[in-house]
Structure formats: structure tokens, C-alpha cells
Image (cartoon, rainbow, N blue to C red):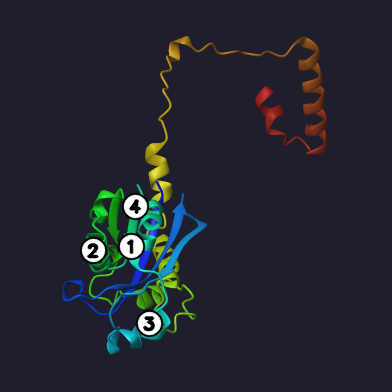
């Protein structure tokens, strides 16, 4: 199944307060390998960016002013995530904003387009209870280079999330492969097995005895095989 790692940047913290998405970044993975197929758009949110959010991602109102609105890229977005496992860090946050945008575009909710939604924050909390599990902390824990992450960026964060996911699930792919491999149908009746017994002829026995005699002479009578034969 296709896996899509997705991240968003927004004008503020809550969609229900009227905040909107200003950036969507997503990367595709097949068989635990990034395919190079990405989805990335900056969006005009039709409202101002809060100062607190600006400090996180650095996307200014002036920069976003001439960007497309979500409706213009909605079909491309839905085609990209269609029938995939959608993987997000703190999925309820991103899902709430995406569902808000879809509702404003008079489209169905996210769950109707993707196969399933996976929350890597929930996974990380189960693996590392009581520890910091934000993206930076996980990158440090799994020794993933996040030096380019000076500010939050949706596409970069989606790429980092894919690497974190691979690290968190390392070993599961071999287990899944082992489970999926068909077991051989082995039904052997021992009584049906015919044993082949090979016996030396007279010439071979004479050569064997001559060789043992030479070994016995060189070893001054300590050849074990010669003793056994005698």
C-alpha cells in the first residue's frame, strides 16, 4: 500500500477558531522507500497569520498573498492521497485543519479519500513513554539529520517524518515478510525413504589396506585404523 507522510503549516492553532492551512507538504513511500513523488503547495489562507505561528514557520502575509487557495489545489491533493495510508505526526491537529478546508470546499472529510490515518506521535508515545516525542526529539533519538530545520516547513517535516517512521518501525518489515511467506507443505514418510549402501570392491579394499600399512609404518605402529582392522 502507498504511504503518504504529510505535514501542514497554519495561521494559528485551532481550525474551529477560523485558522487556515498555509502550507501542505507530503511525500510518497512504497515498500519502505521514498519514491520521489511529492506534493507541496503554499496557500493563501484569506486571513492574517498570527504572530505566534509566524515565529514557528516564518511564512508572512506578504509571501502568501499571491498563492493559490485550497480549492484550486484540492483535486490534485485528493488524487495524491487517494487510497493511501496517510501518516502524520499529531494526526488530529493536521486532520482537523484538512477537514476544515475540505468542508469549506464542499468536499467530503479526509477519511473518505485515504485508506487509513496513522498518528506517529501516538506510536512514539507508546515506544518512548514519558519522553519528549516531538519531531526534533525523535530525530535526535534516532540520529536523523535535521540541521536544515531552522524553521518548520511542511515538505521538510514530511520528509523527516518518513525517516523517523522507518526508524521506529525497523524490523517490522522482516517480521511481516516472515508471516506472509507460505509455509512449505512437507509430509515425508520415513518408511518410503530408500537408503543406498555402497560397498568397496576387492581392488578398492586392497588399495585401502596398502595405504593403511604405509601410514602405520610412518607412524611407527600408532595408526588407529590399522589397530582397528587387526
Query: Could you tell me residue 154's position as x and y percent?
Result: 40, 72
Say few, some or many: other residues with alpha carbon within 10 Å of mark 1 (under 14 / 14 to 19 / 20 or more). Answer: some
Residue 71's disc number: 1
Looking at the rendered structure, the secondary structure element under dot 3 is helix
Look at the picture and state if 123 lies above or below 80: below
Query: Could you tell me residue 21's position as x and y percent?
Result: 31, 72
> Measuring 25% from the left and 63% from the top, which residue is drawn there?
95
> Measuring 39% from the left and 37% from the top, which residue is drawn there?
180
Residue 57's disc number: 3
Query: Could you tell me residue 158's position as x and y percent?
Result: 41, 67
Say few, some or many: other residues with alpha carbon within 10 Å of mark 2 (under 14 / 14 to 19 / 20 or more). Answer: few
Instruction: Tell me which numbered mark, 4 or 1, is placed earlier along the sequence.
Output: 1
Q: Which residue is mark 2?
A: 104
Q: Is residue 135 left or right of residue 155?
A: left
Q: In the image shown, does 15 or 208 lie closer to the viewer?
A: 15
Q: Are marks 2 and 1 in contact (CB under 8 Å)?
A: yes
Residue 138's disc number: none
Q: In the image shown, does 202 or 125 lie closer to the viewer?
A: 125
Image quarter of the C terminus: top right
- Disc 1 and disc 3: Cα gap in Å? 22 Å
Instruction: Tell me which numbered mark, 4 or 3, is placed earlier along the sequence.
Output: 3
Looking at the rendered structure, the secondary structure element under dot 4 is strand
Query: Could you tell me residue 151's position as x and y percent?
Result: 41, 83
Q: Which residue is mark 4?
A: 85
Say few, some or many: other residues with alpha carbon within 10 Å of mark 4 (under 14 / 14 to 19 / 20 or more). Answer: some
Look at the picture and state if 160 lies above or below 196: below
Say few, some or many: other residues with alpha carbon within 10 Å of mark 3 (under 14 / 14 to 19 / 20 or more). Answer: some
Instruction: Tell me which numbered mark, 4 or 2, is placed earlier along the sequence.
Output: 4
Badge nearest the viewer, 4 or 3 = 3
Amino acid at each position: 500500500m502507498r504511504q503518504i507522510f504529510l505535514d501542514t503549516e497554519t495561521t494559528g492553532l485551532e481550525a474551529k477558531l477560523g485558522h487556515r492551512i498555509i502550507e501542505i507538504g507530503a511525500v510518497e513511500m512504497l515498500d519502505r522507500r521514498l519514491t520521489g513523488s511529492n506534493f507541496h503547495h503554499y496557500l493563501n489562507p484569506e486571513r492574517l497569520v498570527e504572530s505566534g505561528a509566524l515565529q514557528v514557520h516564518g511564512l508572512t502575509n506578504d509571501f502568501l498573498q499571491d498563492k493559490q487557495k485550497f480549492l484550486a489545489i484540492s483535486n490534485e491533493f485528493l488524487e495524491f492521497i487517494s487510497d493511501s495510508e496517510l501518516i502524520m505526526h499529531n494526526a488530529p491537529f493536521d486532520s482537523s485543519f484538512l477537514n476544515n478546508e475540505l468542508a469549506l470546499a464542499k468536499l467530503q472529510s479526509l477519511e473518505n479519500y485515504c485508506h487509513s490515518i496513522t498518528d506517529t506521535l501516538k506510536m512514539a508515545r507508546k515506544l518512548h513513554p514519558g519522553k519528549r516525542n516531538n519531531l526534533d526529539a525523535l530525530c535526535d533519538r534516532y540520529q536523523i539529520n535535521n540541521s536544515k530545520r531552522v524553521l518548520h516547513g511542511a515538505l521538510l517535516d514530511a520528509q523527516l517524518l518518513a525517516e523517523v517512521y522507518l526508524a521506529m518501525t525497523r524490523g517490522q518489515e522482516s517480521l511481516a515478510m516472515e508471516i506472509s511467506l507460505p509455509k512449505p507443505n512437507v509430509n515425508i514418510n520415513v518408511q518410503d525413504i530408500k537408503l543406498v549402501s555402497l560397498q568397496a570392491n576387492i581392488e578398492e579394499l586392497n588399495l585401502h589396506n596398502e595405504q593403511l600399512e604405509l601410514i602405520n609404518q610412518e607412524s611407527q605402529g600408532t595408526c588407529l585404523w590399522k589397530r582397528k582392522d587387526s
